[in-house]
Image (cartoon, grey):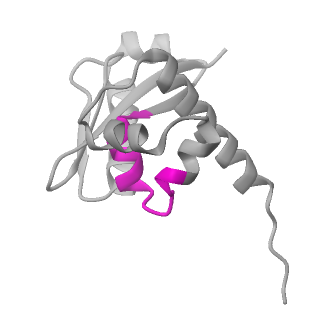
């Protein structure tokens, strides 16, 4: 069975940075989300290829789980409307704005509601198929 490698992606004013706790020292950077994602995928592959114990541990393959902080979600996806997502999550839009800005930290329960709303939105988007006009 494939093991999961969790990749944390963070953003500062200039760039994105990624790391994984499962593979010590495996980090990457990039100027865009897609670039850092590609770079960390390459670094994970290199680390596994070069370390026999990692190669054995991930011999059946692996899948990547990307984690980003809530504020980064709205930077990465500016198309997502905070008010609409708050409504989908059943929460106050002002509170979600505070979470997104970092002014407040979401509880585990609130983070779960936000994750569920994001999943619902993703499922809605994935179910759409555009046709020619």
Please name the residue shown 42% across and 40% down the image: 96
Query: Which residue sits furthest bottom?
Result: 133
Which picture quadrant has residue 55? top left
Tell me where residue 65 appears, x and y as whole percent: 50, 30
Let me know if residue 78 is in the magenta part.
Answer: yes
Q: Is residue 112 left or right of residue 23?
A: right
Which picture quadrant has residue 19? top left
Tell me where residue 47 appears, x and y as whole percent: 32, 27
Number of marks: 0
The residues colored magenta run: 67-83
Tell me where residue 123 appears, x and y as whole percent: 73, 46
Instruction: Give the quadrant of the C terminus.
Output: bottom right
Please name the residue shown 41% across and 18% down the image: 107
Q: Nearer the viewer, residue 128 or 22?
A: 128
Let me know if residue 2 is in the magenta part.
Answer: no
Residue 50's place in the image compared with 99, above or below, is: above
Please name the residue shown 49% across and 38% down the image: 92
Q: Nearer the viewer, residue 26 or 12?
A: 12
Please name the residue shown 27% across and 43% down the image: 101
Instruction: Give the quadrant of the N terminus.
Output: top right
Residue 40 visible from this viewpoint: no
Residue 54's place in the image compared with 103, above or below, is: above
Residue 28 visible from this viewpoint: yes
Q: Is residue 121 left or right of residue 72?
A: right
Q: Nearer the viewer, residue 58 or 100?
A: 100
Q: Is residue 105 left or right of residue 93?
A: left
């Amino acid at each position: 069975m494939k093991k999961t490698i969790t990749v944390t992606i963070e953003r500062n004013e200039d760039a994105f940075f990624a790391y994984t706790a499962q593979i010590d020292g495996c980090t990457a950077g990039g100027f865009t989300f897609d670039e850092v994602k590609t770079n960390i995928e390459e670094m994970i592959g290199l680390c596994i290829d070069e370390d026999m114990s990692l190669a054995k541990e991930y011999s059946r393959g692996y899948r990547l789980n990307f984690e980003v902080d809530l504020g980064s979600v709205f930077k990465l996806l500016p198309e997502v409307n905070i008010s609409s997502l708050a409504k989908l999550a059943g929460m106050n839009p002002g509170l979600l704005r505070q979470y997104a800005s970092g002014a407040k930290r979401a509880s585990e329960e609130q983070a779960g509601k936000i994750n569920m709303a994001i999943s619902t939105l993703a499922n809605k988007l994935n179910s759409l198929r555009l046709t020619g006009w």
